Amino acid sequence: MNAIINARIYDYVTYIENGYLLYDEKIVEVGDMKNYKNEGYDKVEDFNGDLLIPTFVCAHSHIYSIFARGLALPFNPKNFQDILDQMWWKIDAQLDNKETYYSGIVAGSEFLLNGVTTVIDHHASGEIIGSLNSLRKAFVGPLKMRGIFCFETSDRYDVNKCLKENVNFAKKHPGEGLFGMHASMSISDKTLKRIAKVQNGLPVHVHVAESAMDVENCKEKYGKLIINRFDEAGILVPDSLIVHGVSLSDEELDIIAKRKCYMVVNTTSNMNNAVGLPFVKNYLDHGVPVLVGNDGLNSNMASEYMNVMFSAHLRAESPTALGVGEVGQMIRNAYEYAGRRLGVKLGQFKSGFEADFMRVKYTPFTKMDETNALGHIVFGLFPNFKPSDVYTYGKKRVKDYKIVGKSLQNQVIEARKYSEELWTKVKGGK
Ligand SMILES: [Zn+2]
């Protein structure tokens, strides 16, 4: 068993000014230094007043998109569909399972460096069968992270293979799979029916109303709103993830709440794609729990939470539309959701919870206690967030701002070769 001493310990519920933590793969005991007894632990780390907080969950990502970094393609989008056609659908169509694996390695390493250790991914690749297992292999192998995966079913792919990949992966790895769907606008009624037939209670993970195009397409083709369309097909089972929701009606939000689904907002991506902003206050007013993702755009959930808060003010035209209390609730929602799906306890410093946490250097120059710790975290820490040490399963994966482990470091370097191969294919060189 190991010990951390002299740490400011905070888990978005409880704050200990000067505390200790005993842990192995899981947390064993937490307390005030007044009650700490040195009982010959394997390793004792003195945090010297640094912060000890749980690592983050990213609730919606596209790990494969990491290889787009620096890739210049002819790009002159007039709308959201053009962004997909000119960029993302060109890239993902070329991915094979080896490149998918390496995208997991590099994206995962970046997540670790930013203190994100659990990722809910939405995957797409030309090679479909075995792709989710390739990502999982990177996560449970060298990265030692936690992941929930699904394949983005849509009519632009071989639908049989999409269905098979989602169903088989979830069957083989219970709790680690969701049923992936791209969006209403890329899924015909025939495909929707097939999904409902094989879904077997598996929650869906789907983009909804990311842009006005998705909404208009559904109205034009089916004469209804997207959530009504999905609900009538019977696919909105509890724990389904409704991603984006930039324009959703009150009626749709009531259905989402009734079906016990979650909204996942990705504000930075929405701003980048110029599709509008999610109306977070309205989701909360309808009793819909909100999670936050990065949509594959960056790996820093701290900045993502800040953008969600600021943009919620802008969207509601009210500086009090979303406070730090709601931000804390979103962070806790993510631990609750991912932990429950994965069958583990995440995000609290309590006996029996997973030892996934991080050390962050932060010296408060104003009083910090349980009443205002969240304000310090959101306004003081998040804008400059970088953990020095990141732990999963009680072991350091990041030490002194660097990835731990030669094999993982080497694989990150090897990944460049595969990214170059992918770029050649995308540019039509192969
Ligand atoms: Zn997305």
Image (cartoon, grey):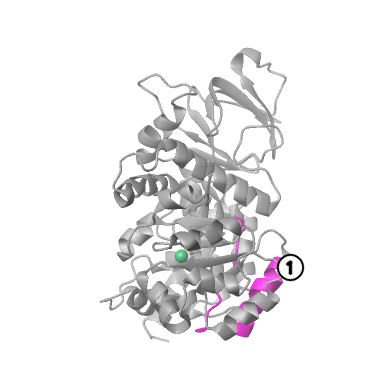
Q: Which residue is mark 1?
A: 171
Task: Decide whether residue 148 is among the magenta residues.
Answer: yes
Q: Is residue 186 left or right of residue 85?
A: right
Q: Give percent across and percent down for residue 305.
A: 41, 46
Q: Quadrant of the N terminus?
A: top right
Res 50 visible: yes
Q: Give percent across and percent down for residue 285.
A: 46, 48
Q: Quadrant of the C terminus?
A: bottom left
Is residue 199 positioned above or below 26 on the image? Answer: below
Is residue 417 positioned above or below 322 on the image? Answer: below
Res 414 visible: no
430 or 307: nearer the viewer: 307
Give the magenta-colored segment's residue range: 147-170
Query: Secondary structure beneath disc 1?
Result: helix
The amino acid marked with disc number 1 is: Lys
Q: What's the residue at 48%, 67% (across, down)?
A: 207
Q: Give percent across and percent down for residue 326.
A: 46, 40
Task: Decide whether residue 30 is among the magenta residues.
Answer: no
223 or 42: nearer the viewer: 223
